[in-house]
Amino acid sequence: MNLLRVKHLEKSFGGVSAISNLSFDLPKGIVFSVIGPNGAGKTTLFNMLCGFYTPDQGSIIFKKENAEQNKEVIYHSLHNMATHQIAACGISRSFQNLQIFFNMTALENVMVGCHLQSSSRFLPSLLRLPSVIKEEQRVKQQALNALAFCHLDHLANEMADSLAYGDLKRLEIARALASKPKLLMLDEPAAGLNDTETQQMSHLIRKICDSGVTVLLVEHNMELVMTSSDQILVLNFGHLLAQGTPDEIQNNPVVVKAYLGEDI
Amino acid sequence: MKRLSGFYLLSLVALILPQIFPDNYYLTVVGVFATLHIILAVGLNLLMGYCGQISLGHAAFFGLGAYSSAILTTRYQLDPWLAMISGMVLVFIIANLIARPILKLKGHYLAMATLGFGIIVHIIFVQTEALSGGPDGLGDIPTLSIAGWAVDSDIRWYYVTTISALGTILLSLNLIASRSGRAIRAVHGSEFAAQMMGINSNKTKVMVFVFAAVLASFAGSLFAYQQNFVSPDSFSFFFSIELVTMVVLGGMASTYGAVFGAILLTFLPELLIVFEDYEMLVYGAILMLVMIFMPQGLFISLGHQLTQLKKNYWPNKKPAGDQQ
Amino acid sequence: MSDYILQFLISGITVGSIYALVGLGFTIIYNASDVVNFAQGEFVMIGAMSAVSFSIAGIPLIIAIIMAMMVTVLVGFALNQFAIKPAKGASVVTTIIITIGASIFLRGAALLIWGKDFYSLPAFSGEQPIHIAGATILPQNLWVMGISVLLVSAVLWFFKYTLLGKAILACSCNHTAAQMVGINVGKMMLLSYGLSAMLGALAGVLIVPITFSSYDAGIMLGLKGFSAAILGGIGNPIGAIVGGLLLGILESLGAGFISSGYKDAIAFAIILFVLFVRPSGLLGHEHQERV
C-alpha cells in the first residue's frame, strides 16, 4: 500500500533544474531513504513535499486516513496546499538547519507539536475554561511521552536554547512525532552528531518505524542509511538514478560511479 | 496555584494601596494612567514580545476607541457602555481588514506599515473637524456608571482601571499558557516550523493583532470617559513609540515585564520633573542606558540577577536538569 | 493646470532631495550595522542649527557649514561609539529603542542649547526667483537639487569604486568574513556613522533657508527619510533616492491637488499600498529563507 505517490515532479530555480521528471512511490510502514551527492535535489524534494516550495509541474498525492475502508483509496493532492494544511494531512518533518522554538522549554516545543492533536480555541484559552485545563493536562502528558520516546524526558523543563546540539536534533523529532504523523520526514538527522549519537539516532529511526510511522530519510551518513533503510532512492542532479534495497544500491555500478567518479 | 501566584500578589498590592493612601496624587491620578498603559502594553506585548511582530502604530487603536466613545456619547447621546462596545466592534473590523496585508510584511517593512497606519489615523483625527473636533479636541464626554454607581472620582477611577488592567493581565497569562499562546510563540520562534506543526501562522498573527487592537480600543474608551476630553495629541506617533518602549524596556515576551515597563514609563516623567529643562535629556539617556546594559529589558534582567543571587546564597541546591 | 503641476513638481523634488539624503543616511548605517537609526533626523537638525549658530556668530557661511558638518560628524561618531557599539548583538527592537533614546537625548540637548526658537539661514545666493514655463524657482531650490545630485553621485561612486567603500559594503554582508580578510570592522562602522551624519548635516544646511529649523525639526525629517529608505527597499541606496524623490513629489502633489492637511496621510497611504504589492519595497529583493 503506497502512502505517498510522486509523479513527474519538476522544479527549477532561475532556469537551473533542481528536480526533473521525478516519479516514485513510497510504501507505507518502511524507512525510505533519499540519497545523492550535494546538490542532487534532496532538500528541494523535501521542501516541495511540505509545501515550502510549489512544484513547477507534476503531482504529489498522499493517502487519506482510513481510505481503504470503503475499498476505494482516496488521496489528497498536496499541490497548492499550505504547509499547515499538509501537516494536517499527517506529514511532519525535522529540519537540516535546526528550526527549534528557542523561546520555549523543551516540553513546550513538543507541546506545540501537539497542536493538531488538540482543539482549544482562542477565546476559551483567554478564559481558561475547564475544557482548556483538561486538554492542557492531556497535551502535556502526550508531549512528555513523545519526549520520553526520544530519551529527552529528563530535559523537559530546560529552555531549548540551553540544550546540546544532539539533544536538539532529537527534540525536533520528538516535536514532529507529537503531531502523530503518518509520514515523518527527517532531513539529515545525523549531521553533526558523533558516532555514539549516530548509533542512537539509528535506533530511534528504527523505533519510530516500528511504531507504525513511515519514515522518509535524507542523510549523508551512508552507514546510517544502509543499516536503517528498507528502501533507498538515489538522486543525481535532480534525476532518479536508482531505487532499491540497500544491498541492491550498494552493488549498483551506476550509483557507485555517481558517488565516486568515473574511474572506479 | 503557582502559575498565578505573581498575579495574586500584584492584585493584592494594587487593591490594598488605595486603602493606605486614599488621596495620594501619584496613586489615584498617575496610577490611573499607569493602569491604562498596562492594558495597552500587555496587549502590545502579546503581539511584539510573544508573536514577534513589531507595531509602531498601536496608538491608533487606542485613539479609535477613545474617539468612538467621545463622538458617540457627545454627538449621538449613546450610552457610554454601548459606545465603548461600538468602538471595540469598529476596531475589531478595522484591525481585521488591515491585519492581513500588513502582517505579511516582515521586520522593518512591518514597522513602516504600522507606523504609516498610525500616522494616517492620527491625521484623520486632526482633519475630520466636524466629527472629531479637530486639533482642539472634543470635550464634555460623560463618565461611566456601573449599575447606578457613577465613576466620578479619582479613587473610583483607580478601582475601575486597576480591575480592568488586572483582568487584562489575567487574560494574557491564561492565553500564553495555552494552545493558542504556544502557537503565538512558535510563530515567533520559527514561523516555518510552526506551520509544519499545523499552525496557520497568518491566522495566528492576525488573531493576536486584532486582540491587542481591541484591548487598546477598550483602554481608549476608558481614557475618554476618565478625561471627559480627547484630542489628537494623545494618539500620535510619539505615543505609539512610548508603548513600544514600555514593552521593550520592561522586557519582551513577559506579561509582568510589560506591566513593569508601563508603570515605570508612566512614573518616570513625573519623577524627572525635578530636572526641569534637562528632563528630555535625562529621559533619553535613561532609555539608552537601560537598553544598552539590559538589552532584554529591566524586568527580565533584574529577574536573572535575582536568580543569580539566590544561587549564590543557596549553592547546595542542585540546579534543575543536572543529572547523570 | 500644467503650470501648477510644474510648480508642485519643483517643490516636491526639492523636499524629495532632502528626504533622499536622509534616506541615504539610513541606508548607509543600515548596511554597515543592521541598525535602523531613528536619530537620523537629529543629524539634520544638528547640522542646520549649528550652521545657523556659527553663521550668527559672524563666521562666513561656507566655513560655518563646514564646521556644522564637523560637529554633526562628531555626534555621529559618538552615537556609534557610546550607544551602538556597546549594544552589539542586541535584537532589532532593542537597537531601535536605543536609537530612539539617542534621538530624544539629542533633542533634549538641542533644547538646552537653542531653546524652542525657530532658526533660519539666508539663502545661499539671494531670493530672486527664476521663472520657467510659468513656474517659479527660488535659487535655493536649485542649490538643494544641485548639491543633492552631487552628493548622491559622490556616495554611489564611493561605494562602487573606492576600496574603502567596498570595505564598508563587505562589513554589511558579513562582519566576521570582513574581519577575516583584514578589514577593520570597528573603523568601518565609525566611518559609516560619520558619513551618514555628514549627509544629514548637509541636508539640514540645504533646507534650513527654505523651511526654518527648531530643536524638534528632526523628527518629521527622520520619519520621512526612514519612509524613503523603506519605500525604495531598505539597504538599497538607489532605492532610498528613488523613494525620497517619490515621497517628496507625492506629498507636494497631494497637498496641491487634494488637501494640504492630508498630504502626509496620502503619502503614507501610497507607501502602504506599495508595500502590500511589493513587500520588499520598490527596488528591494525578496530574501529567500533556507530551511
Image (tube, coloured by chain):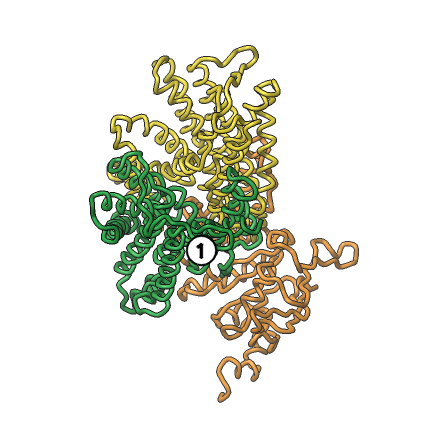
Chain colours: A orange, B yellow, C green
Q: Is residue B318 visible?
A: no
Looking at the picture, tell me which residue is in the foreground, A260 or B100: B100
Q: Which residue is mark 1?
A: C234
| Label 1, residues with CA under 10 Å away: few <14, some 14-19, many ≥20 | many
Counting from the top left corner in percent of width and height, residue B150 is at 51, 12
Residue C241: x and y in percent read 44, 57
| Above/below status of A119 relative to B13 | below
Instruction: Name which residue lies at 50% across and 27% down.
Output: B220
Secondary structure category for the residue under label 1 = loop
Amino acid tagged 1: Ile
Left or right of B137 on screen, residue C97: left
Foreground pick, C31 / C213? C213
Q: Chain of mark 1?
A: C
The N terminus of chain A appears in which quarter of the rendering? bottom right
Question: Height in image: C197 above or below A235?
Answer: above
* Residue at 50% over, 68% down: A219
